[in-house]
Every structure is written in C-alpha cells, then in structure tokens.
Amino acid sequence: MTSLLILLILINQYDFTIGRVQYGGGGDWYSNPSSLPNLLKAVNERTTIRTAPREENIAITDPKLFQFPYLYLNGHGNIKFTDEETKILRQYIASGGFLHADDNYGMDTSFRREIKKVFPDSPMIELPFDHDIYHSFYDFPNGLPKIHEHDNNPAQGLGIFFDGRLAVFYTYECDLGDGWEDPTVHNDPLEKREDALKMGINIIIYVLTH
C-alpha cells in the first residue's frame, strides 16, 4: 500500500472506502449489507476523513485490490482461498495493506485455517488492551467491545504482525458488523451500536495513521 494513497486520503484528496473481500468456499461474504455504509457515514461525520457512501466488493485476484488500504472480510460460513489468492493476499499485506476479519459467527475455523496458509510462520496473538488500535480516536480501556453474544465467551481482538506492523486484525466473539447495521436489523441497544461504530472508526484511523 503506497504511503501516497494514504496521504491523499488523510488530506481529503481521495474518498476513503473499504474493500469488502469476495471469497470462495460457500460462506456469505456479502452479509450485513447495511453495516459498511453506516460505518463509512460515521467516519465521514465524526472525523476529517472524507469517505465514499459505500464499500466496494473486491475479489482478491482483482488488480484493484492494492488500491484499498483496508480490506474487510466477514460472514457466517466457510472461507476458502485458492493458492493464487493466498499468494496475492500475502503480497497485498507485504506492500502495506491491512485485513480486518470480523467473525459474524461461523467463520472462525475456516478463517484460522486459511490465514495460516497466508502466514504460516506468524502466530495470531491477542492484542493487549493498551494497543494503539483501542485508543486511536476513542478510548477502549478494556479492549474490544462485546456487541453480540455467541458462545458466552469474551470478545477478543487478535492480530498478526508483519515486519513489526499489525497487518491482520481479527475481531472474534464480538460481531462489530452486526452493531454497524441499521438499528431495525438486530434491534441492538443504542449503546451497543455506538460502541461498535466507535471501534470501527478506531480501526480505520489506526490503519490510516500507522
């Protein structure tokens, strides 16, 4: 990811948007359709970053992949990367790109398997609560907020580091995407939706400033 692209986003010469990853394997990569437009709207309203009105769906093999500083991947089902996609995703991250995987309940086993193919020698570790991603715009002193209940486990923010940089952020047992959706979709309390949006803004600010 070029530093010039990120600089243009920060000085509002380029509309920031999110690349939603289209993947094979049968999982619903398209889930939570109102989530990313709502997050982008919140970023536009609450920060100085100008955003596009919605995300762009992007295949890993699409040459435009490298134009996105932030890729978002979620769903409920199976994820499968081809050998070519595995190679390209590693190249994308090695060039400065960032992948946010957001478990929408049901993709955990396949995501861990597939990301291990991308980074076989890089363990996924839980981020400490003092990591910058929890304090880049809003403060989350206790780490990742819990938005939806899945298996009665605490929310975990897991990461993979590449060349000393947080390159993959996995929000597990949390379901930020559900919290970003329109209020009537899940009937989440306002405070849960607010926590989800604030954390989403934090991730984007972190990506654009680190």
Image: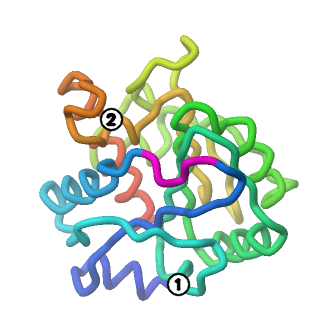
Would you call the spot at circle 2 few (<14 residues within 10 Å), some (14-19), or many (20 or more)?
Answer: many
* Residue 133 position within the rendered picture, expressed as x and y whole percent measured from the top left: 44, 47
The residue most toward the left is 45
Residues drawn in magenta: 27-31
Contact between labelled residues 2 and 1, with CB atoms less than 8 Å apart: no
Would you call the spot at circle 1 few (<14 residues within 10 Å), some (14-19), or many (20 or more)?
Answer: few
* Residue 35 position within the rendered picture, expressed as x and y whole percent measured from the top left: 33, 48
**Residue 30 is a magenta residue:** yes
Residue underneath mark 1: 64
* Residue 204 position within the rendered picture, expressed as x and y whole percent measured from the top left: 38, 58
Q: Is residue 210 above or below residue 125?
A: below
Amino acid carrying label 1: it is Lys
- Number of on-image labels: 2
The residue most toward the top is 152
**Residue 133 is a magenta residue:** no
Q: Label 1 to label 2, Cα distance in Å? A: 28 Å
